Image (cartoon, coloured by chain):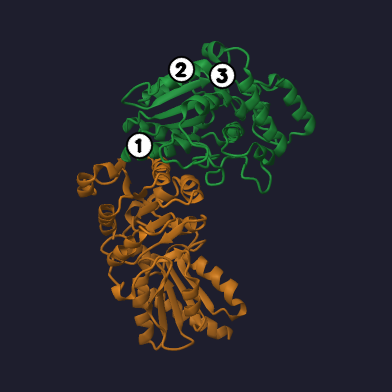
Chain colours: A orange, B green
Amino acid sequence: MRNTCLNMVHELARRDPRPVFIGSDLSPGLLDAMKAEMPERYYMEGIAEANVVGMAAGLAMDGYMPYVNTIATFLTRRCYEQVAVDLCLHDLPVRLVANGGGLVYAPLGPTHLAIEDIAIMRALPNMTVVAVSDAPEMIRFMEQTLDWPKPIYIRMGKGGDPVVSRAELGFRIGKAIPMRNARGKGGVALMATGVMTANCLAAAELLARDGIDASVLHVHTVKPLDAEAVLEHARPARLVVTVEEGIAIGGFGSAVTDLLVEQLGRAMPAMLRLALPDAFPQKYGVQNDHFEVFGLTPPQIAASAQQALARDEGFA
Amino acid sequence: MEADRVLGGAAGPLDERSKQLRRLIVRGLAGGGRGHIGSSLSLVEILRVLYDDVLRFRPGEPGWPARDRMILSKGHGCLALYALLADKGFIPIETLDSFCRRDSILGGHPEAGKIPGVEASTGALGHGLSIGVGMALAARMQLRDSRVFVVLGDGEIDEGSVWEAAMCAGKHRLSHLTAIVDYNKIQSAGPTREIQDLEPLLDKWRAFNFAATEIDGHDVEGLRALFHRLPLADDRPTAIICHTVKGKGIGFAEHDPNWHHKAKIPPDLVARLTAALE
């Protein structure tokens, strides 16, 4: 997903005069082809996130579309004020290409885990927040960045993520994709963003084996949230389950909950938010280990949904 | 601080143009009933010379691509900028009366997109130089000969992001970028020498690969001559340390941190400020 995204920056720069790449001390050789072909539009700067974001703003004010790339935690926490003021207040078409969203950097520990990136980025006015599911979808998304006039936070997965997106379903920024439809009313509506959509599709299969009808909505754009699609999937469901690779506070599930509370009131289905707790992760290992620790593997998602259904029945 | 005595406002009394611009600042202060007084008054001659003699701009076409860019990174000094923008016809003079009012375009910090002639929304400190670096790179890529000027406060350059930007500007040899420090030596809490000493300030900028010099920031002739010599070097950005006086022109406010900002400026104080400029 990461290489695909960066190669797309080069590809887009070939087609359009606006894209510029700005890295903050990344790997040697990164995007060498772009650097060789258009050196004036390739910047590899120092470890200075506040500066590169401000610099990107200055470039965007004079017509460019910078794609700023570094590790997600540093591109969000380290320069939050520059992102808020320089990019969002000015509403500039700068793209924050964030490596290792969520738990990707599990072995490197909590300094490198972007667990609240979605929450803090979606809190900013004018910001668009996107987490695609896999590399082919990244291509479809990146194509559209040329026409999106606002700042975008692009949360990247680990790379080599299982491909679950389907070209025939299309891609539009701000438009969620129904990946699996419910057969009828009263089932489980699974909603996910980023690579969690793959886990939800697998969880839906497991639920189906147990006779539970489950839909899956892939909400690649967390902000602006596709209210219409979320409501359409939530209304007929008995249980809505949101699944995300990040903390619950202010995250994707929070966005969905806010919407459902405001729009459905007492008609709200039961809600289950599967996300990280309000704590810094304590373990190392790899991303998949952390999925297990936090209950985000397909069998865990399916089991949690079943428990929530049972609990809901108990209340009924 | 020998340089203080030699350079800070030693150029003699203010001329009528400098007083006229200060009267516009007082007009804004009166309109809003508040404002950063001292921080605006130390800036007047820097901005006056830039707008009168140096910058290329078109008030009727603020987005003219070939214009020079001027970013007031110390956004809290905005009343001085508003005075110049009104004086040059970017905004009507009467707009100053609406300063900080609910529906005004003139807030307590300047906003791009609202105010013609304001290049970037500033107020959070330490942002302007990085934005200026981006604009200078854009000018180079677009083969425009636009120059970029960034005016920074002395307290502002406590921010680490300023020095990130300075390193980057030096690396890219942005000779068409000029950083100007309004060195009035008083930040909000007190003298910079006590709160966060900046010395040796010229050496700092030179160490970051700027061609750096210093001047009396109220010496109109000196500023004019210096700005006309820009760039000071063909292969690096320029930094100009302007030794200024906080509150310059209002005798009872000069050198006094208590005049950095006033949240309440009643009519009798407006009258005193006005009288001080007679």
Looking at this view, name the residue that lies furthest to the front. Answer: B60
- In the image, what residue occupies the spot 57% across and 26% down? B43
Question: Residue B144 — which label?
Answer: 1
Q: Amino acid at mark 2?
A: Ala
- In the image, what residue occupies the spot 37% across and 30% down? B176
A152 or A78, nearer to the observer: A152
Which residue is identified by label 2? B225
Q: Amino acid at mark 1?
A: Arg
From where the camera sits, is residue B162 visible? yes
Q: Is residue A33 above or below residue B152?
A: below
Which residue is identified by label 3? B218
Residue B109 sits in which quadrant? top right
Q: Chain of mark 3?
A: B
Task: Give the mark toward the camera: 3 or 2.
Answer: 2
Disc with the residue nearer the chain's start (3 vs 2): 3
Q: Are marks 1 and 2 in contact (CB under 8 Å)?
A: no
